[in-house]
Amino acid sequence: MDYEPGMLISIVIAIIFSCLYSIVVLFWSNFLASKPLTIRIIAHVTGLLATYAIYGLLTYFLTLGLNHITTQKFFDYLFEELSWLFIISNSHYISTVFVFYIIRYVQGIEEKEKEKSKLELANQQMQLSLLKFQLNPHFLFNTLNILSTLIYSEKEKAREVLNNFSDILRYSLDSDKEKLVPIKTELCFIDDYLFIQKMRFEDRLQIIKEISNDCLETPIPPMLLQPLIENAMIHGVAKMEEGGTINIRIEKSGNNVCIAVENSLPISKNKDVVNGVGLRNCDERLKVIYGNDSALKIDSTENEFKVSFQIPAGN
């Protein structure tokens, strides 16, 4: 199809005008977005009337030419062509405003999602900070008592206890800087802790470790195992005259690593052990980091108490 040069120019001008007009309406809508609803309605109605007048002027000019423009003829033209001209002009204005508010609505949803994510992250970090392990004051006092006993009689053992205690404090302070550590790093800390506990309970405390080598590099939240072992120590070994055994088992099962701490404990001697603060804190930390699937599981029999959980095996 052949187009007259004048027609092509008119089409190009119409497209350019339409684009510029849409930009102006978008800026106008953005300017009004923060205004009260009443002002926005009045301003948009004014915009509709102004658009109608501008469209009428342009179509009148294109139809009759500049030489025929008079005020009376212009208003007569507007009223004669009111229906179709009003629909065309207002549809452009309304569609542009509609697109603006759709974009604004989508942006609002995205902002809310970002804000929600930030709040959830901040909440998780706050929970983790609150649930972060803090050394039991009794453990600190007991360690100091051990040191005071050994420092004169067995200086070499006192030095070992002091070195292990320093490593425990250092790990405790550094745990706030690390979200996850390899299981082997956590176990080194546990060894330091158990060394001091062994000095306290001597032959009354027996430790069994069943740890798979393919689990040693699996990342785990720092200071997570110690409360479970301390729970076994306080409610198991310490309450039994003959002492007891603590079994630490870590093994891989499919895509997860299963971790369990077992100790000999006649459950009838302490029924409140399930509600211990240490267990609740570990349970909350696991849920915050991994979800409910990693929550603590507690199994007890007449002679044994077992706490277990699972975490993703990682790479």
Image (cartoon, grey):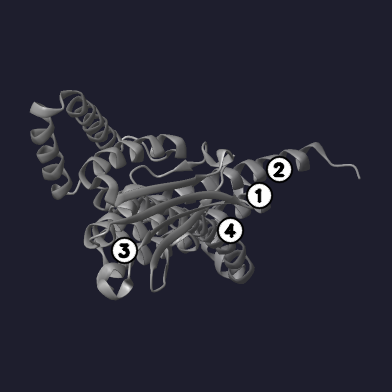
Q: Which residue is mark 3?
A: 39
User: Which mark is on residue 92?
Assistant: 4
Mark sitting earlier along the chain (4/1): 1
Amino acid type, mark 2: Ser
Mark sitting earlier along the chain (2/1): 2
Quadrant (top left/top right/bottom left/bottom right) for the C terminus: top right
**267 or 139: which is nearer to us?**
267
Q: Which residue is mark 2?
A: 10
The answer to whether residue 74 is seen in the rendering is yes
Q: Which residue is mark 1?
A: 62
Q: Secondary structure at mark 1?
A: helix
Q: Is residue 297 left or right of residue 257?
A: left
**248 or 296: which is nearer to us?**
248
Crowd tier of the residue under label 2, counting other residues whose Cα lies within 10 Å: few below 14, some 14–19, many 20 or above: few
Asked if disc 2 and disc 1 are in contact, CB closer than 8 Å, the reply is yes
Mark nearest the camera among 2 and 3 is 3
**274 or 263: which is nearer to us?**
263
Asked if disc 2 and disc 3 are in contact, CB closer than 8 Å, the reply is no
Give how far apart the Cα atoms at labels 4 and 1 are: 19 Å
Mark nearest the camera among 2 and 1 is 2
Residue at horizontal 36%, vertical 42%?
Answer: 222
Mark sitting earlier along the chain (2/3): 2
Residue at horizontal 8%, vertical 27%?
Answer: 152
Q: Secondary structure at mark 4?
A: helix
Mark nearest the camera among 4 and 2 is 4
Mark nearest the camera among 4 and 1 is 4
Crowd tier of the residue under label 3, counting other residues whose Cα lies within 10 Å: few below 14, some 14–19, many 20 or above: few
